Amino acid sequence: DGEAIGPTGGGATAAPEPEPAPAPVPPPAEAESDSDFVEDAGAAGRPHSWTDGGIMVVSKVREMEQKEERREAKAAAKAAASEAAAKGQAPAKGAPPAPKQGLPPVPAKGVGKGIAGKGKGPGSMPVAKAKAKAAKAEPRKPAVMPGVAVKHVFWSPMFLDANGNTVWHEIDQEGAAIDTEELEFLFAERAAQARRDCQEASEQEEVKLVKRIRVLEEQRRRSICVMLARLPPQAETVAAVRTMTDGALDRDQVELLLLNAPQADEIQLLRKARETNTVDEYNVWDTAEDFMLALIDVPRFALRLQLWGFEGFFMERFEDLNRAAGDLLEACEVVLNSVLIKHLLGLALFAGNYLNGGTARGRADGFALEALSQLRNIKTSQVDRGDTLVDYIMQQMERKYPGELAAAFAPQGEAEVIARAARRKQTDIASDVQALKAQASALQRSSRAVDDDDVMVRHGEVISMCLAELDGLVVGLGHLQARWEDLCKWFHVDHEGPQKKTTEEFFGIWSGYLKDVQQARVAMQVKEMRLKQEQLRKKQRTTRTGRRPARSGVPCADGAHAAGDEAAGPDAEASQPP
């Protein structure tokens, strides 16, 4: 309708040209898939949502816009078709045919369907419900990304609301700080890479490893380390060995040092290793080698440990030996002067000679003491009684010498003294005393050879006192031997030669025989007690029978009926149950 301006810029008015027909608006292109709409929506900044299966759907806004575009396209196509029909022209090439009246418009391909046209589209689920479900499935905790490739934990995660009352909410509130570097190091897919990453994260500079110098065998090193675990710290232990202070180390700890003290070959090996190895901040001695080197630096460490160890166990060992010798000497005196032993032996001799009458074993003046152990095997002819010859001798002792057995089996009596002596061996006591004395003499000579060490001199004097105690014990053993010989002569027993009898054999026979006598005595006391109880029950039954009420119409003072008793007579009383 406007004016046509020519090249000259004149104002001539051009003839109006007919308005060209508007180009037909093509219909909207079919979407290839739901992802096309998602990409378009994302590019245009339009919102979109996700279903539970992870399938992306078009939002309600996009759906309304598409409907509007289809409505406009259909209106434009209808107008173009009407105009073309009025002018007698065919529809433009490529224009879609006009839709038939009364039919719903054909939706674009892919709209309202899921993946590949399957499943339910967005119209089947309300948008509000889909949004609520998508919001509930979103995690609340911040994203975490390990620094290295690590192994995964295959579980079914739960995503909860912020407001809740479960154990998971309490755990979230309390929190739990963990060492993530260690976690990456332990569960990395590649241990070497994880180790390098952890080291680079913790320290950027390289750290040089400390080398521990070892020269002893592995088994030997383990023994030393076990010993060190039971000792005070190294400095205190070495100082205690140097000064030998009482109470610094107990007896068990000193014995451990003695057992694990280095020998001559180990000392030479350690000193050579000290000369050939350089010790600095990156080269140090291992624990076992370090302790041994510190120990061998103590002057005469072996002699110090030997002196200290001897002093630690001497008094206990000396008291044991002295007590054992005293038990034997006391038993010798008891048997030599015991009237009970003489009576028991005499009854056994008289009974044996009587039973052996008319045989070669009869008319004996004595017998070997081993026969005392066989008397319990000679049973009586009355099977129901179950007694033996020991029971007979015990009963004769109670009749002829009452009170002697009770005194012998009393606490600290003759039976107890003989039983203690039966556990001692005179030969072992003498040999142990001689060995202990030889050890003390050797230590005394070694300590006297050192005159420039006050600690060694002081402990050398202690060893001299120990030797004096041992000399006194040797004298006591001589007296014991003399009394033992007297005892053997008293019983006509050999104390020397191939048939000699030892102290443990002699006192063992008498201890066993006294036990047999005591068992027979206890059995007899039990029988007597049961007999007394039975007699007492019979007496009580008799008393209750004599006081039974009478049967009569006239009550007595105690509730009985006297007339009835007189009428019944003695047979009536006898017929009453007890």
Image: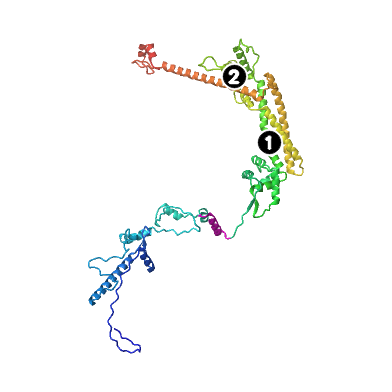
Residue furthest out toward the top = 358
Q: Is residue 55 left or right of residue 215?
A: left
Residue 76 percent across, percent down from the top left: 28, 73
| Image vertical order of residue 456 relative to residue 556, above or below | below
Residue 196 lies in the magenta-colored region: yes
Q: Which residue in the structure is indicated by mark 2? A: 374
Specify whether residue 363 is in view.
yes
**Residue placed at 68% from the left, 33% from the top?**
318
- Whether the magenta-drawn stretch holds residue 456 is answered as no
Magenta-tinted stretch: 188-204
Left or right side of 540 for 73: left
Classify 10 Å Cα crowding around label 1: few (below 14), some (14-19), many (20 and above).
Answer: some
Most common SS among magenta residues: helix
Q: Residue 462 or 204: which is nearer the viewer?
A: 204
**How many numbered discs?**
2
Q: Foreground: 377 or 217?
A: 217
Q: Residues within 10 Å of mark 2 (few under 14, many from 20)?
A: few
Q: What is the three-letter code of the residue carrying label 1?
A: Phe
Q: Dot 1 corresponds to which residue?
A: 314
Quadrant of the snapshot with the C terminus? top left
Q: In the image, residue 507 lies at what x, y percent?
A: 64, 23
Q: From where the camera sits, is residue 403 visible?
A: no
Q: How is the image coloured?
A: rainbow
In the image, residue 130 lies at what x, y percent?
Answer: 34, 60
Three-letter amino acid code at the position of disc 2: Gln
Left or right: residue 264 compared with residue 86: right
| Sooner in the amino-acid sequence: mark 1 or mark 2 | 1
Disc 1 + disc 2, Cβ < 8 Å: no
